[in-house]
Image (cartoon, rainbow, N blue to C red):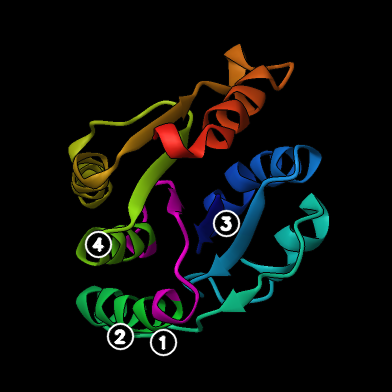
């Protein structure tokens, strides 16, 4: 099974790091795609370095400062769909509830590629985070698989191993 793991922001990098370690440990075939939502060195590269995340296979560079959110989401969808046409995975996995995760989830849905949504931590239903709530709902509704981990309940990393077990079954998803 080929997996495309999509990240774009600092919180995504932090959540994806242990997942990437588990993928490597268990020989999961994956490609790491960085949407470029956080493109500043202090918001992106520093976390790759400090968390030991390998360089992305592709950096879409889809985010341009001061563009509207709809322009950024649209550009991400165009750039990401081109990559999926060139190298179609069996599963796209998005991390979190940011706009770039929504863009990649929409591409998976439109292209008929199975989608997994990976989230770590408590979900907030605060109206101050309305955009993230909307993204969560849409991504969850499009997803074939939902992985949710509460960090305080996964101190030994067993949840990441369970995710790998599920993904290795591949054909049964």
Q: Residue at x 49, y 39 (%)?
A: 170
Q: Residue at x 34, y 85 (%)?
A: 66
- Pick out the residue farthest to the top: 153
Q: Position of residue 1 (x, y in %)?
A: 55, 49
State the SS at label 2: loop
State the SS at label 3: helix
From the viewer's perspective, is the residue at label 3 or at label 4 nearer? 4
The crowding category of the residue bearing disc 2, from other C-alpha atoms within 10 Å (few below 14, some 14 to 19, many at least 20), is few
What residue is shown with label 4? Answer: 106
173 in relation to 14, above or below = above
In the foreground, 69 or 53: 53
Using the image, tell me which numbered label, if any, was put on residue 67.
Answer: 2
Q: Position of residue 160 (x, y in %)?
A: 63, 28
Query: Which span of residues is magenta-colored?
Result: 84-100
State the SS at label 1: loop
What residue is shown with label 3? Answer: 10
How far is disc 3 from disc 1 in space, using C-alphas?
17 Å
State the SS at label 4: helix
Give whichever of discs 3 and 2 has the lower sequence position: 3
Q: Residue at x 24, y 50 (%)?
A: 135
Give whichever of discs 3 and 4 has the lower sequence position: 3
How far is disc 4 from disc 2 in space, using C-alphas?
20 Å
The crowding category of the residue bearing disc 4, from other C-alpha atoms within 10 Å (few below 14, some 14 to 19, many at least 20), is many
In the foreground, 100 or 57: 57
What residue is shown with label 1? Answer: 64
144 in relation to 32, above or below = above
């Amino acid at each position: 099974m080929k997996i495309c793991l999509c990240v774009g922001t600092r919180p995504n990098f932090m959540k994806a790091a242990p997942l990437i370690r588990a993928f490597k440990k268990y020989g999961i075939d994956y490609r790491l795609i960085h949407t470029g939502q956080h493109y500043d060195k202090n918001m992106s590269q520093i976390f790759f370095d400090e968390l030991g995340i390998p360089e992305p296979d592709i950096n879409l560079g889809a985010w341009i400062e001061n563009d509207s959110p709809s322009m950024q989401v649209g550009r991400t969808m165009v750039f990401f769909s081109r990559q999926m046409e060139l190298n179609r995975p069996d599963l796209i996995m998005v991390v979190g509830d940011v706009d770039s995760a929504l863009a990649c989830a929409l591409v998976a849905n439109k292209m008929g590629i199975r989608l997994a949504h990976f989230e770590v931590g408590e979900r907030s239903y605060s109206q101050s985070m309305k955009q993230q709530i909307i993204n969560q709902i849409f991504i969850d509704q499009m997803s074939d698989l939902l992985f949710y981990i509460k960090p305080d309940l996964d101190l030994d990393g067993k949840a990441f191993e369970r995710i790998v077990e599920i993904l290795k079954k591949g054909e049964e998803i």
